[in-house]
Image (tube, helix red, strand yellow):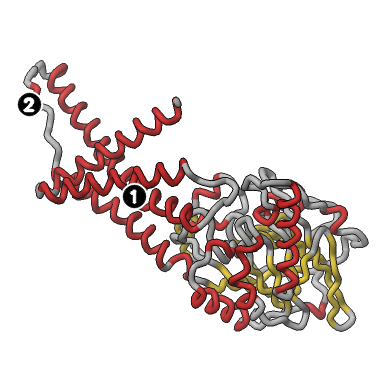
Amino acid sequence: MIRWIIFVIVILFIEIYSFQAFRTVIKAKPFLVGYQILSLLAIVYIIYSFTTFDRSVGQNKNSLFTLGLLLLIYIPKIVLTTIMFGEDLFRLATGAIKYFVNNDPDVSNIPSRRKFISQVALGLAAIPFASLLYGIFEGKYNFKVIKQVVFFPDLPDAFDGFTITQISDVHSGSFDNQEKINYAIDLVNEQKSDIILFTGDIVNTHATEMDPWIDIFKRIKKPAFGKYSVLGNHDYGEYVNWPSAKAKADNFEAIKNIHGQIDFKLLLNENISIQKGEDKIAIVGVENWGHNFKQAGDLAKASEGLSPSDFKILMSHDPSHWEYEVKNHEKHFHLTLSGHTHGLQFGIEIPGFFKWSPVQYVYKQWAGLYENVGRYVYVNRGFGFHAYPGRVGIWPEITVIELKKGQSVA
């Protein structure tokens, strides 16, 4: 009950201040009345959707729409509220100085709201509104191919120039446009890499989410050295209420079977060797291991039979695994490929110069390449989307990594 009271107070605070910004700039009564009616309808719909959310179903098109609507409406309104409340503090401070310092008791000395400040507030609020709107309709399918060269002094000679295409976090249950997904699969095939690695989260929860997309993902051409995959945290069905343990277990088996249906070899805490000429490298795949998520990954089991000198590429969905267990492991995992963070699907990124997302305050490694004493982790920004039905600034990614022998020139 207390939470609802706090929620109502916060919403009223935001709505009142947001309305002040519009009322200061726009005087037309029909517009202001229409604004209030739409705001009321939106908040009623959002509250209804969240309070009737079915945890036996999990995320669906309605929950995606609801969260998108919530962010689209209230992030701009929070910007408005911050600026308008800041102006009120300034107005009150000015009035207090006049009253207490200048001994002027005239209440009219408190400055009135300035139209200019409201105009600035509305202009600034329009930026996240337009960005979120673009993210929902275009950004979520704004696929980018990101190429990365990684140098290793102990890379076997035959694998100098070896290329890997990595995709991660498909979240097929969120898709709503076959044309865009077909385009992304074409991009994957155009890279013509030596091997394709998929690092988990093929669905949001249910295996059936992948049914409409099986044939499309089967179009990913099998390269010379194969297609391999691992599981992510969403593949275990942990985030819904199941009618029985058997239903959950059956769903998990069905999810594992999907990988075979799209011609990927699923690695479950195991490793395989790929050979080129006289040289070989190991592909190691662990089940999900997250510092704050399911820990089914068993690195010792997955790397059985491998020595520290063997060149190893590890697929581990959650980059916190690298931070807490992999980067200093005695087996020496040369390159780890992860995903999971999605870059929060929101941030600012200027390739090669600057990148920022709120997710960096949770994950030390959240997008791109990171290094520790010659061991690397690459965090893919994700192929699909989850929760918020869009992407702003952090675009869906297809990664192409080239292995090179030698020392990095950086």
Residue 392: percent from left, percent from top: 44, 60
Residue under the point 59% across and 62% down: 171
Disc 2 target residue? 108
Residue 263, visible in the rendered structure: yes
Residue under the point 66% across and 83% down: 192
Q: What count of labels does the image hold?
A: 2
Q: Amino acid at mark 1?
A: Ile
> Who comes first in sequence, dot 2 or dot 1?
1
Q: Secondary structure at mark 1?
A: helix
For residue 299, side relative to residue 399 (left or right): right
Residue 369, visible in the rendered structure: no
Residue 315: percent from left, percent from top: 74, 62
- For label 1, the crowd category at 10 Å Cα-Cα, with few meaning under 14, some 14 to 19 and many 20 or more, is some
Residue 216: percent from left, percent from top: 60, 77
Q: Which mark is residue 174?
A: none
Residue under the point 41% across and 43% down: 48
Distance in Å between CA atoms under marks 2 and 1: 34 Å
Residue 122: percent from left, percent from top: 24, 50
Q: Amino acid at mark 2?
A: Ser
Of 260 and 90, the residue lying toward us: 260
Q: Quadrant of the N terminus?
A: top left
Residue under the point 62% across and 53% down: 365
Q: Secondary structure at mark 2?
A: helix
Residue 209, above or below 59: below
For residue 40, side relative to residue 295 (left or right): left
Q: Quadrant of the C terminus?
A: bottom right
Disc 1 target residue? 73
Residue 376, above or below 99: below
Judge depth for marks 2 and 1 and give the one in front.
Answer: 1
For residue 228, side relative to residue 149 (left or right): right
Q: Residue furthest front?
A: 243
